[in-house]
Image: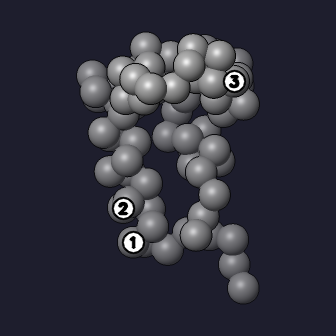
């Protein structure tokens, strides 16, 4: 048993990350979250930001994004 995601799972996560990271700088900002999830209230996106931003730089890196995402 391993907690590591499979290659397929990585590819899916990368695709998902790239979809949200519209300017392609490798980080998801609050604005990009809001654009991708227009129906989520600002508080929910703020909570997501805070929960995912492990190093506190105000944006979500791919590594932080992976930690936010439960592996199937
Ligand atoms: Ca970005
Ligand atoms: Ca961060």
Q: Which residue corresponds to mark 2?
A: 11
Q: Callout 2: 10 Å neighbours few (<14), some, many (20+)? A: few
Q: Splitting the image into 4 quarters, where does residue 64 fall? A: top right
Q: Is residue 49 visible?
A: no
Question: Judging from the image, what secondary structure is the residue with disc 2 in?
Answer: helix
Extreme left residue here?
Answer: 23
The residue that appears at 69% across and 24% down in the rendered structure is 47
The reply to whether dot 1 and dot 3 touch (C-beta < 8 Å) is: no
How far apart marks 2 and 3 lie (CA) works out to: 26 Å
How far apart marks 1 and 2 lie (CA) works out to: 5 Å
Judged left or right of residue 9, residue 35 is: left
Q: Give x and y (percent) for residue 17.
A: 40, 42
Q: Callout 1: 10 Å neighbours few (<14), some, many (20+)? A: few
Between 40 and 66, the one nearer to me in the picture = 40
How far apart marks 1 and 3 lie (CA) works out to: 28 Å
Upstream in the sequence, badge 2 or badge 3?
Answer: 2
Q: Give x and y (percent) for residue 40.
A: 51, 26
The residue that appears at 32% across and 51% down in the rendered structure is 15
The reply to whether dot 1 and dot 2 touch (C-beta < 8 Å) is: yes
Q: Give x and y (percent) for residue 8.
A: 39, 72
The mark found on residue 8 in the picture is 1
* Colour scheme shown: one colour
Q: Splitting the image into 4 quarters, where does residue 36 fall? A: top left
The reply to whether dot 2 and dot 3 touch (C-beta < 8 Å) is: no
Judged left or right of residue 70, residue 13 is: left
- Looking at the rendered image, the disc whose residue lies closer to the viewer, 2 or 3, is 3
Question: Judging from the image, what secondary structure is the residue with disc 3 in?
Answer: helix
Q: Which residue corresponds to mark 3?
A: 47
Q: Is residue 56 visible?
A: yes
Q: Splitting the image into 4 quarters, where does residue 32 fall? A: top left
């Amino acid at each position: 048993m391993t907690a590591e995601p499979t290659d397929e799972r990585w590819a899916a996560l990368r695709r998902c990350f790239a979809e949200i990271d519209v300017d392609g700088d490798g980080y998801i900002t609050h604005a990009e979250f809001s654009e991708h999830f227009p129906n989520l209230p600002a508080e929910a996106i703020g909570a997501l930001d805070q929960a995912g931003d492990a190093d506190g730089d105000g944006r979500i890196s791919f590594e932080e994004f992976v930690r936010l995402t439960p592996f199937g």
